[in-house]
Amino acid sequence: MNDIWSGIEAAFWLVITLDADLVDITLRSLQVSLTALIIASAIALPFGTWLAIRRFRFRRAVIATLNALMGLPPVVVGLIVYLLLSRSGPFGVLGLLFTPTAMIIAQVIIITPLIASITHQAMRELWAEYHDLLISLNTSKSQRIATLIWDGRRTLLTAALAGFGRAIGEVGAIMIVGGNIDNATRVLTTAIALETGKGDFALALGLGFVLIALALLVNFAIHALSRTEREGRW
Amino acid sequence: MNDIWSGIEAAFWLVITLDADLVDITLRSLQVSLTALIIASAIALPFGTWLAIRRFRFRRAVIATLNALMGLPPVVVGLIVYLLLSRSGPFGVLGLLFTPTAMIIAQVIIITPLIASITHQAMRELWAEYHDLLISLNTSKSQRIATLIWDGRRTLLTAALAGFGRAIGEVGAIMIVGGNIDNATRVLTTAIALETGKGDFALALGLGFVLIALALLVNFAIHALSRTEREGRW
Amino acid sequence: MSMAVSLHDVAVRRRGKSILGPITTDMAGTGFTIILGPNGSGKTTFLKVLHGVERISDGALEWSIPETEARQAQAYVFQSPIMLRRSVAANLAYPLQLEKLGKPAIAKRVSEWAQRIGLSDALDRPATRLSGGEKQKLAIGRALIRQPKVLFLDEPCANLDGRATREIEALLLDANQRGTRIIMSTHNLGQAKRLATDVLFLLNGRIHERGDADVFFAKPSGEESAAFLKGDIVE
Amino acid sequence: MSMAVSLHDVAVRRRGKSILGPITTDMAGTGFTIILGPNGSGKTTFLKVLHGVERISDGALEWSIPETEARQAQAYVFQSPIMLRRSVAANLAYPLQLEKLGKPAIAKRVSEWAQRIGLSDALDRPATRLSGGEKQKLAIGRALIRQPKVLFLDEPCANLDGRATREIEALLLDANQRGTRIIMSTHNLGQAKRLATDVLFLLNGRIHERGDADVFFAKPSGEESAAFLKGDIVE
Amino acid sequence: GTGQALRLGQAGDVDAILVHSKSAEEAFIADGYGPYRREIMYNDFVFIGPQDDPAGVSKSGNAIDVLTRIFSASSRFVSRGDESGTHQKELALWADADLDPNEFGRWYNAVGAGMGASLNTASGLNAYIMSDRASWLNFGNKGALSLLYSGDPVLFNQYAYLPVSSTRHAHVNVDASEALEAWMTSAAAQKLIDGYTINGETLFIFNAKPD
Ligand SMILES: Nc1ncnc2c1ncn2[C@@H]1O[C@H](COP(=O)(O)OP(=O)(O)OP(=O)(O)O)[C@@H](O)[C@H]1O
Ligand SMILES: Nc1ncnc2c1ncn2[C@@H]1O[C@H](COP(=O)(O)OP(=O)(O)OP(=O)(O)O)[C@@H](O)[C@H]1O
Ligand SMILES: [Mg+2]
Ligand SMILES: [Mg+2]
């Protein structure tokens, strides 16, 4: 318990003194996770919606696979991305390994199935409601997807936030492809893992609380923003 | 790329020969993650549903917090559970550290917010549909929750599967509280991390593919089961 | 035991717009009240306020008996029927299950009422797949199955054919005779005349006229109600 | 250009149960066809099949013009109105946006039609919060705003008051005179008589009788249709 | 660990590596992944264990004796179990003591983790563990553990610098790698390495031979 207290204390001092290193890795955490979130959402929201509106032979199999991919172990994703980006791998010439870009790639792979699954589930209800009308109005596939995403944007918030949460707290994959290099690819989670390894639990916890505070901040900000839309359900 | 191939080959041989160690850690993975899933669902499904039907002052704040908790970094959860269960911690006398129970506790903490968030989002729609009727029939709070969970069970599948996915692929927390002890607390993900650390990427990938196959299997099984219910939307 | 309700300056506002009230009135006795009024005049809102499912912004509403008892003794048929995502039988059984009735008793009542509303053949079908009229019949059956003391109906026959309408009307009159207080809105003036003991005419969220059915239909006192009865423009 | 559709042995089965057909018939001309039939007789299913939103299990349906053109020229008003989770104005604008009309043109048409359906005051309100009748009016306006060649309506006036019913009827007759083919189901026999040029009577998923309105209402040839017109029991 | 670092070097993802496992390093060179290895510095392994020392490790004469005492007392022992340099050293010592960890009972915990994580586990289990001195001194979660034995010359731990072969990986930044090597073997580096202390203890001893 004492450790937890000293963790809170450490977090307090880290934030109060605006520790330069802390600011640096926090900003990098945010940058990596938000970029990954934007890219993953751009893929997963339309894809999940498309899955909700399309009937085809292997639909159930695709959905089951997508759900299974939510369980992609980050370490394995990290390994595969590492092997692909490694000098001796197919994309080695790009020199992306141990850069934030590599971390973003790994996170996109991890969170896309999660966002797509939740999106699919949320959009099924809305599609059941809109189905007859949108078919009747002779809409194109892309018009249907756009309409559903727009009218269901509030329910899609959970999907995006789940993806963000998974990204910001993830460590296994980005440790492998980012390498936790000081001043280059160190983010909050890899720093926490480092301090844990050192047995410096107070600092590790301190960083952890900063991370949690960050997640809270982002969530409250997004909720506040979506609240500025008029109240109530449409 | 060669590594990926040899990973697939390794997975193939591991499965074909029914490697005793592999069977052991695979079963332990399943046991830990499924137990965590059941406990977390027992908490999160009613709680998420309750959040959907209850209006109270700090509802939005609770929801934003819940969403933020989806981003709980596993390493921090692992640390806190470690500190609580360690000999000098408040629950030290129970001697739970470095046992599967400790791993289950950590996973429950990690996946409960995720399941509760997705549940809340899914149940909001159903509640909007049922609201007037259930109020009119003068149902009690718990009757409302039970009705929503039962009638929405198909949409809650995604919530549970997301939780399972997160649990089965998680490594950061269970490494700390389980200790990856051979024959005692080693599971698939910690074994993968170990092989990665050893630089035996083929074996690591092989185990990873086994893990992914396991996740696929569980998902297909659940989908097949839920399909035996009569087809179509209710 | 009869239940009465009194409203005092009840008002409902949404998004700054007044959609009902202020209304001060009493509803007592065991009659069959028909609520009339043009689209958007507040009939649904008024019924929901009486039933307690619509939050009131102002004023007070009081039942003559304790609130929990009052709520337990009411049932409501919504304008667009709300179907549980279950079979027809499970929809009928649901209100009884809430009261923890035994399984055999439930099965008996369910088959009895399925008969009365003409859905005996549909018991195993998912309620959400019923036709518009079948849904309305099911909603009416589900409301009557608990034998409520007070029954609210919001245009319950809008999607019913001639025969079903007459059968439902018979059911309602029967229930009314056995002591169920009925408050119902409808746009079908013929139906209103067949059923009403008294009429309440709503306009722009207020009670514009109220009176015995005979008097109201024969000689409405307001210009607007007269015009409405003639199907004329009511502003 | 007139659009005709021909059905050949069309049948719809769900869960092993036949709910429509087999039906072999033609619908041509520019008339105003009213579909009658008791609850559950298959009116909604038939209309949806014609419109192409209900999957047919057997048989074939063919339009006289290419399918994409045919689909583009139709509109449908569903029995329970489907509201987009947007404002009333956005609901009216939606079909026009799909056709990529310019903003000013859309705004003009929207305010024009809001006027016609009597929802000018409600343009900024969320459509999902409208009263039952207001929703129906909005759905009708949204269907008419694209000036379809063929218009399907499924009990469009079930929740409307007398005045709104007459106004909508006038709108429909007007559209019909300008060449819109209308196919509509209703339980309101008075309305059927006022509007129909021809009538199609459905029973148990089949066409039981079909003919000119004058003839049908004056002297229905089947026993069941005669009973139905008298509001009697139809089995 | 050392294994992962060697893999990174083999793939050409890094320009040079600093590791501590002589046999693996020699294999790395024999396979042509690096031209040579250069010893830089060494530190030593130490035995950590519960302060009350149930196995009596602190009274041992040498490293073999330490392991024998732990074995006889069946005291909880945490092994890295990850084939790292430290783990291989530990296995070599067990072999020297004529003991086979594969036959040990539940007191022997192969945790398969890095030094820090293994130390955390040992601390949680209140168990014996072999650690390198630097990790131990840097370690913050000592709990009831303390350093019980050190000093046997067999426990010395040599770190070597291995540049990655530029014939195998043309993109390797040879200049930077050479500059780093030159600096690491310089007098300036010697001063830094020998002068690096934690709580007054020297961690590493510089032993690079100048060019
Ligand atoms: N939540 C809300 N927000 C804004 N306006 C509302 C809301 N609920 C109802 N209204 C408006 O209040 C008015 C009265 O609605 P109500 O549903 O009570 O009418 P009604 O008399 O039942 O009409 P109908 O005969 O069409 O069913 C309508 O104009 C409706 O648009
Ligand atoms: N998906 C389905 N699965 C099973 N039965 C169905 C399905 N859809 C419709 N039905 C049944 O088919 C019959 C015809 O339905 P339809 O909606 O066409 O009737 P309708 O003539 O429009 O009735 P109403 O006047 O009540 O609106 C009904 O008995 C209905 O329960
Ligand atoms: Mg109403
Ligand atoms: Mg119908």
Image (tube, coloured by chain):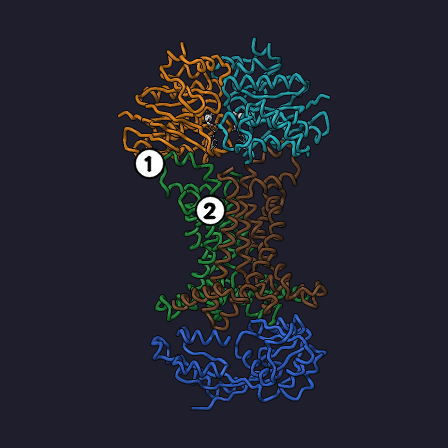
Chain colours: A green, B brown, C cyan, D orange, E blue
Residue at the spot 37% in from the left edge and 11% down from the top edge: D215
In the picture of the structure, the residue carrying the numbered disc 1 is D101
In the picture of the structure, the residue carrying the numbered disc 2 is A120
- Label 2 vs label 1, nearer the camera: 2
Residue C210 % position (x, y): 61, 16
Please, what is the three-letter code of the amino acid marked with disc 2? His
Q: Is residue A185 visible?
A: no
Q: Secondary structure at mark 1?
A: loop
Asked if A42 appears above or below A131 in the picture, the reply is below
Badge 1: residue crowd in 10 Å (few <14, some 14–19, many ≥20): few
Q: Secondary structure at mark 2?
A: helix
Subunit that carries the residue with mark 1 = D
Asked if E204 appears above or below A84 in the picture, the reply is below
Numbered label attached to residue A11: none
Residue at the spot 49% in from the left edge and 33% down from the top edge: D128
Instruction: Give the image quarter of residue E96.
Output: bottom right
Residue at the spot 52% in from the left edge and 43% down from the top edge: B228
Q: Residue furthest left?
A: D1
Residue E136 % position (x, y): 60, 78
